[in-house]
Image (cartoon, rainbow, N blue to C red):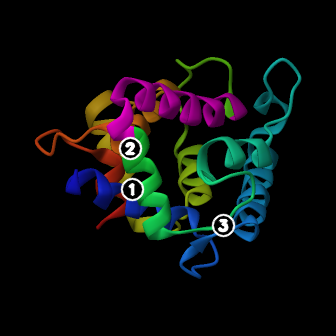
Amino acid sequence: MDYLKTKWAIWFKSLDADKDNKITPEDMQISAKKFEEIRKLIGDKGSVDGAEFDNTKWWNDYIFRKGPGVSMTKDEFVESLAEAYQKDKAAFRQEMERCFGDIAKFVTENMDRPIQEQEFAFGFKVFGQEDAGQVAKAFQLFTAAYGQPTVQQIVDAWVQFITDDDQSKQDMIKEAFGN
């Protein structure tokens, strides 16, 4: 469990856009602005069935685990994930598959579509990784494993990062975000 809690703390840090040690509606707004940057990059192909990605709904469904828009400290966030994980690991994994799948649908309905390096970099920026060297390292990890990574492979890597407690497996997201 300690390994997962370490990874969840890394995820928390990536969500805490204003670095005030809380995830708040302000962080959600910063995230929304980053999504708009990606929308400009990818144009109109970033909608599913004509629907826009609802950043607020995503945060309320998956991040604000105490209730819509309710701020959380790192300890509260990590403990809420631990409770959900311990209650039902399979359900927790399914929730995280939806979480990262919803973001992927912002980019494309085609989960087998290859991701270009610029899109990859913007995606990591949304999650707080703005270190170009770390992002380049992450892209190299993905290309070494898969050739040009697809949307689904990136979703799968995020799901592994959040749900997998096996330290013996390579975890590209953990490596990308450092420790």
Q: Residue at x 89, y 22 (%)?
A: 50
Mark 3 nearby-residue class (10 Å; few <14, some 14–19, many ≥20): some
Q: Which residue is mark 3?
A: 71
The magenta stretch is: 85-106
Determine if residue 81 is in view.
yes
Give the answer, above or below, for where 114 lies relative to 118. Answer: above
Side of 102 relative to 46 (left or right):
left
Give the answer, above or below, for where 88 lies relative to 21. Answer: above
Q: Which residue is mark 1?
A: 8
**Camera-side residue: 96 or 111?**
96
> Can you tell which mark lies on residue 162?
2
Q: Amino acid at mark 2?
A: Ile
Residue with the most extreme left position: 168
Instruction: Answer with mark 2 or mark 1, whichever residue precedes in sequence.
Output: 1
The residue tagged with tag 2: helix, strand or loop? helix
Q: Amino acid at mark 3?
A: Ser
The residue tagged with tag 1: helix, strand or loop? helix
Q: Does 100 lie within the magenta span?
A: yes
Determine if residue 149 is in view.
no
The residue tagged with tag 3: helix, strand or loop? loop
Label 1 to label 3, Cα distance in Å? 16 Å
Q: Residue at x 40, y 46 (%)?
A: 83
Q: Position of residue 129 (x, y in %)?
A: 50, 64
